[in-house]
Image (spheres, helix red, strand yellow):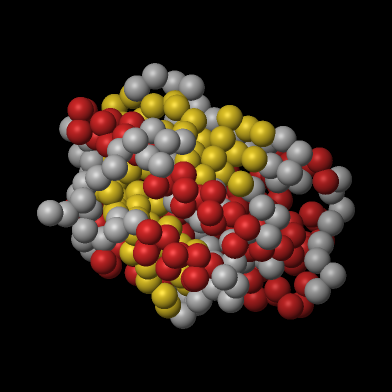
Amino acid sequence: MNPKISIIVPVYKVEKYLHKCINSILAQTFTDFELILIDDGSPDNCGRICDKYARKDSRVSVIHKENGGLASARNAGLDIAKGEYIGFVDSDDWIESDMYELLYDLCTENDCDISNISSIIYFKDRIQKNGTHPLIVHQKSEAMKAMLVGDLYDEVVWTKLIKRTLLEDIRFSEGMVYEDTAFTYKVIHKSKKVCSIGAPKYHYIKREESIMDNAKKSIRIDAVLIYDEMFKFMEKYYPDLTSLVSLKLANSALVIMNAISGHDEFNKYKNHFKTVTNILNSYYSTLMRLKEYPRNVKILLTAAKCHPIFYKLLVNQLPRRMQA
């Protein structure tokens, strides 16, 4: 008989965190699950640690594969998952013992395809506890808006439990960061109802060497490309939500353009700058109507519309507090 839940954990260079993560999953009060550990070509002892757990607990299975990144590892787990529902945990994090019992009960008791809890995020200098709201059940369109607004829940998958039938033709985008952003809105679109409760059961470690931080340091433009794709999707299925997506796209684009404009190696990222500017300019008329943007930001948007180099010259003259 197949388990009720498949929990997928990609593993790569997290040797000092891995025991705490796996132990927190195996200690769940909800016991009818399989734990799929994907050793994504980790060069340390992570693969051996995973194998040791598999020998001890029959619920644990291990995939050893060549390094392909987080999305590739998650997809490998999805390809073999047998559970009625799917959960994701990052291997440097840990979870409360009743997290999956709560998520499963939320789905089954409220006839929902996706359930959400909240999280505690550990920064280097502070701790942030997210969400204390009561149970909320959304229809699909309401859930899509809630995800984009981000007050109740957002696109991250590690706070969610997802019915596996929603994922038959959906996988994570490989070779990109912000893979959760590219994934979750498509899953919500396949759902009927989504429920959420503000119970911080997931402990997320914000590491400086994380994939997301490295993406910012290396100036990746994935977020802009993903929001551009998302806008076209929303325009087709949820036209009343396009302004929310255009705002996210513009914010991401401006952050990238600011970073490149002031970079010592501007020429190295010149093609990225041009690509992002061209995408941003295609939303110019929409963005100029947004009340969220102050006058100085709209001046920058207009400069970019006239010519990308005007933006670079102008943004380097503005005080940092006036930039997007």
Q: Quadrant of the N terminus?
A: bottom left
Residue at (21% x, 51% y) in the render = 3
Task: Say which quarter of the image contains residue 134.
Answer: top left
Residue 182, position as x, y percentages in the image: 42, 57
Residue at (70% x, 55% y) in the render = 208
Task: Say which quarter of the image contains residue 142.
Answer: top left
Residue 305, position as x, y percentages in the image: 63, 59
Where 251 sits versus 192, above or below?
A: below
Residue at (50% x, 76% y) in the render = 41
> Would residue 88 be visible to someone looking at this image?
yes
Task: Say which quarter of the image contains residue 167.
Answer: bottom left
Where 152 sits versus 113, above or below?
A: above
Considering depth in this image, is 178 or 296 the residue closer to the camera?
178
Side of 14 where 322 appears, left or right: right
Where 168 sits versus 33, above or below?
A: below
> Would residue 277 be visible to someone looking at this image?
no
Residue 93, position as x, y percentages in the image: 54, 48
Residue 319, position as x, y percentages in the image: 86, 45
